[in-house]
Image (cartoon, grey):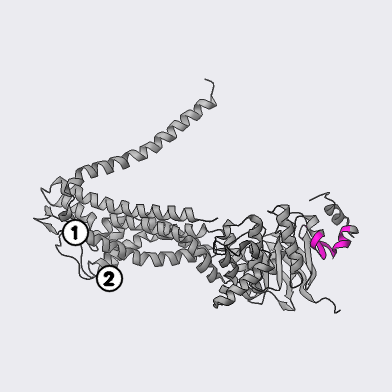
Amino acid sequence: MVAPQVKFEIRDLNVWFGPAQAIKRLDMEIAANEILSVIGPSNSGKTTFLRTLNRLIELNVNCRVSGAVELEGKDVFRIDAELLRKKIGMVFALPLPLPLSIFDNVAYGVRMHGLKNKDKIKAIAEEALKEAYLWEEVKDRLAESAFKLSGGQQQRLCIARTLAVGPEVILFDEPCSGLDPISTAKVEDAMLKLKEKYTIVLVTNNVKQAARVGDRTAFFLSGELIEVDKTDRIFTAPRDKRTDGYIRGKFG
Amino acid sequence: MKRNPYRSQKIAFALLLLATLLIIVPVGLIVVIIVQKGLPAINWQFLSDIPRQGMRAGGIFPAIVGTLYLVFGAILFALPIGLLAAIYLSEYSKENFMSRIIKLAIVNLAGVPSVVYGLFGLALFVVFFKFGASILSGSLTLGIMILPIIITTSREALESVPQSFREVSLSLGASKWQTIRHIVLPNAIPGVLTGTILGLGRAAGETAPILFTVAAFYLPQLPKSIFDQAMALPYHLYVISTQVPNVDEKVRYGTALVLLAMVLFMNLIAIIIRYKFRRKKKW
């Protein structure tokens, strides 16, 4: 077996919002086809980290970035933002369907990228919905508003919508924070399956979720990466006692 | 005297209710008086005939048509410009000195007295561009007058579309313009339409801006092109109320009633559109 391919290489990354520094001197690698869980208390820079990877932080006018983020050796800040986001999908903390039908939600991305062939769009949407374990539940009501789905279904719809674009990486930003345990289990199952094809970065406030699905886990605190290692190791023998404290629920 | 919080709450409540009722009273009175005095004048001839006997008899058809021309001319000019400006201001412009100046200008534009617009239209469109006193000049003047209304309401409509929709669309690799075109605009349209129709109502009712730029004292025929003068309801009402002696009261109130009905009808459409889309709103 070949050594795992490096998907992301992050070197000396700093992010500021105005005078406040949200990420401090971050060095990290993310391997292809792994699930990297990112844990840490609120305000530790987890979400900022995710939104740097797909450059969504550029929507903040007062945001400043230094350092390098490379996707397969290419500087993400030099790639066309649209092209980059086509490769790096994102699932947000709350289920955020667009105000369109179920089908149009899934088809939105490819349509925006210029695909016109209706049969192809249909095939892609069906495939994506199956991959997100939603097809059976929605195949007879594709024309209905996406807002009629339950919260868990909406979140899986958002996953399907991301998959339909054909990304290489999927960023999950606390995807289960608004979901009940059963829906959470379904989303986690989907993630474990997706890892075969995609690289996944999962930001989560739920330490147990990180333990359940992450291959590796990174612990952030106040914008700094405290440590990153195999999930087993982080949860059994962390090197830093702050990590130990956090996963035992002693602070944060 | 010891203060009783329960009683002061009751007094405050009564004052608030009183102030609110005071708003309804004048509106109700205006409508009642005008309907009562104007309704006897309304018949088919009044709505479809030209004015006769020095505007003391006959109908007001040319004035109705003139007002319709002016209103739709104004919207044709103000809606595209206003909407595009609103898109630029709410989606593209950064918060800086320039954008603050623009926003300040829009607020001030809304505060300019309508007679000043009339004088401005006279100087710019009638004299400088040599459009003469014409529907074109009047429409452009009214258009500029309602531009701030359209820009402001459109901006509010655009900004009320949740930021998260934009983020989702962008995160799927859509471009900024695609995001605006497919996600932001469709969800802002009801607000934009509401503002537009409110602007229409305003344009239909104003006298001063059309006084110097288009309105004819008496023109017993319909305009043939946008370079013709035209009669218009507000100005006609002014003329028969103050400039022509011995006009029957019911003709004056009849004219007022038609004008009021047109404006209220437009407001009603705005309300219906807003209501329908609010019910359809899915977030």
Q: Relative to residue B247, is residue A102 drawn left or right? A: right
Q: Position of residue A9 (x, y in %)?
A: 77, 73
Query: Which residue corresponds to the image point at 52% horizontal and 68% vertical from the top-left?
Result: B182
Real-space CA distance between mark 1 and mark 2, rounded to the nearest whole angstrom: 31 Å
Q: Residues within 10 Å of mark 1 (few under 14, many from 20)?
A: many
**Viewer-proximal residue, A108 or B203?**
A108
**Viewer-proximal residue, B275 or B94?**
B275
Residue B5 in sight here = yes
Q: Which residue is mark 1?
A: B61
Q: Position of residue A85 (x, y in %)?
A: 65, 72
Q: Position of residue A38 (x, y in %)?
A: 77, 61
Q: Residue furthest left?
A: B53
Classify residue A32 by image quadrant: bottom right
Pointer 1 chain: B
Classify residue A12 by image quadrant: bottom right
Q: Which residue is mark 2?
A: B128
The amino acid type, in three-letter code, at marker 1 is: Phe
**Viewer-proximal residue, A71 or A195?**
A195
Q: Position of residue B209 (x, y in %)?
A: 28, 59
Image depth: mark 1 or mark 2 in front: 1
Q: Which residues are magenta?
A: A212-235
Please, what secondary structure does the residue beneath circle 2 have? helix
Which quarter shows the N terminus of chain A? bottom right
Please, what secondary structure does the residue beneath circle 1 have? helix
Q: Which mark is residue A156?
A: none
Does residue B82 sit above or below A250 in this rendering?
below
